[in-house]
Amino acid sequence: SGNQPGDPLRAAAAMVKAVESENPPLRLLLGAAALKGARIKLEVLKNDFDNWAEVSAGADFPKE
């Protein structure tokens, strides 16, 4: 206890900043670990999308 990387006061300040922002984020990541994990997940998703793009696009009706 007390050795966590996250600071509750900084997290609260980040939330207030986001809420008061002119363009608030749909999702707010709090902490370096959350940001790193989300970036890894985005890369995995991008690879899936890229690798399966032809199959995905092929589900549409053919263009005449």
Image (cartoon, rainbow, N blue to C red):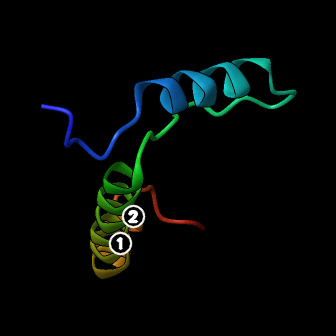
Residue 19 position within the rendered picture, expressed as x and y whole percent measured from the top left: 70, 18
Point out which mark residue 17 bears: none
Q: Amino acid at mark 1?
A: Glu
Q: Amino acid at mark 2?
A: Arg
Establish if 44 lies above or below 10: below
Which quadrant of the view contains residue 4? top left
Q: Are marks 2 and 1 in contact (CB under 8 Å)?
A: yes
Residue at (35%, 69%) from the top-left corner?
A: 49
Left/right placement of residue 1 relative to residue 54 reads left
Please tell me whether mark 1 sits on a helix, a strand or a loop. Answer: helix
In the foreground, 2 or 23: 2
Residue at (38%, 71%) from the top-left corner?
A: 46
Left/right placement of residue 16 relative to residue 10 reads right
Residue at (41%, 25%) from the top-left corner?
A: 8
User: Could you tell me which quadrant the N terminus lies in?
Assistant: top left
Q: How many marks?
A: 2
Residue behind mark 1: 43
| Label 1 Cα neighbours within 10 Å, binned few <14 / some 14-19 / many ≥20 | few
| Label 2 Cα neighbours within 10 Å, binned few <14 / some 14-19 / many ≥20 | few
Circle nearer the viewer, 2 or 1: 2
In the foreground, 34 or 52: 34
Point out which mark residue 39 bears: 2
